[in-house]
Image: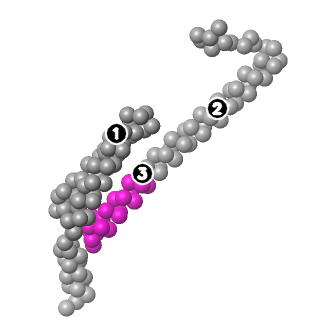
Amino acid sequence: MTDAERLAELREIFMGAPEAVSTRILAVVASLTLATIVLWLVRRRTLREEYTPIWLAVAGAIAAISIWPGLLLALTQLVGAWTPRSTLFFFGQAFLVAICLNYAVRLSGLTLQLKNLSQEIALLRERVERGDAPVATPTGSR
């Protein structure tokens, strides 16, 4: 038996290992809990509506993979991973990298906006102190 044949046999053993029913039930409960928490946070206006589809899609994907284990096996075969767990780990890390990149882009934009606003306030303060321009009152205040 060659090394390639042994590796193929070992991969088949990994792919054929049964999942515990308790693990699947726990994953379904976790996905339903995640969906509930997301909707509760949106209702309390703690989480903005624009993020809701992303998190509900994650909860739905976890539920789908938990309910139909063949889906995860097919995805594992498609990706070429050795075990379904490694496929989950890979996609989990890819999701975390995407979220971190999204927040880095938003943070960069907010940093630039904060710098511009600080400079604008400093210029306006200087004009007011020199007496060059009258102080405008905000609309609606008296």
Is 45 or 112 nearer to us in this picture?
A: 45
Q: Are marks 1 and 3 in contact (CB under 8 Å)?
A: no
User: From the viewer's perspective, is the residue at label 1 or at label 2 nearer?
Assistant: 1
Circle 1 — which element? helix
Examine the image and state in which quarter residue 121 appears: top right
Circle 2 — which element? helix
Q: Which quadrant, please, contains the C terminus?
A: top right
Q: Is residue 89 magenta?
A: yes
Q: Main secondary structure of the magenta part?
A: helix
Residue at x-position 78% and y-position 23%: 126
Q: Which residue, given by chain and number where applicable, does mark 1 sit on?
A: 39
Residue at x-position 36% and y-position 44%: 37
Distance of label 1 from label 3 (alpha carbons): 22 Å
Q: Is residue 107 left or right of residue 26?
A: right
Query: Is tag 1's residue or tag 3's residue first in the polypeptide sequence?
Result: 1
Q: Where does residue 95 sit, x and y in percent of width and height?
A: 38, 54
Mark 1 Cα within 10 Å, few/some/many (few <14, many 20+)?
some
Q: Looking at the rendered structure, which numbered label has been put on residue 116?
A: 2
Which portion, as a residue range, is magenta?
A: 77-97
Q: Is residue 70 magenta?
A: no
Examine the image and state in which quarter residue 16 appears: bottom left
Q: Where does residue 86 sit, x and y in percent of width and height?
A: 32, 68
Residue at x-position 17% and y-position 58%: 68
Distance of label 2 from label 3 (alpha carbons): 27 Å
Q: Amino acid at mark 1?
A: Leu
Q: Which quadrant, please, contains the N terminus?
A: bottom left
Mark 3 Cα within 10 Å, few/some/many (few <14, many 20+)?
few
Q: Amino acid at mark 3?
A: Ala
Q: Which residue, given by chain and number where applicable, does mark 3 sit on?
A: 98
Q: Amino acid at mark 2?
A: Asn
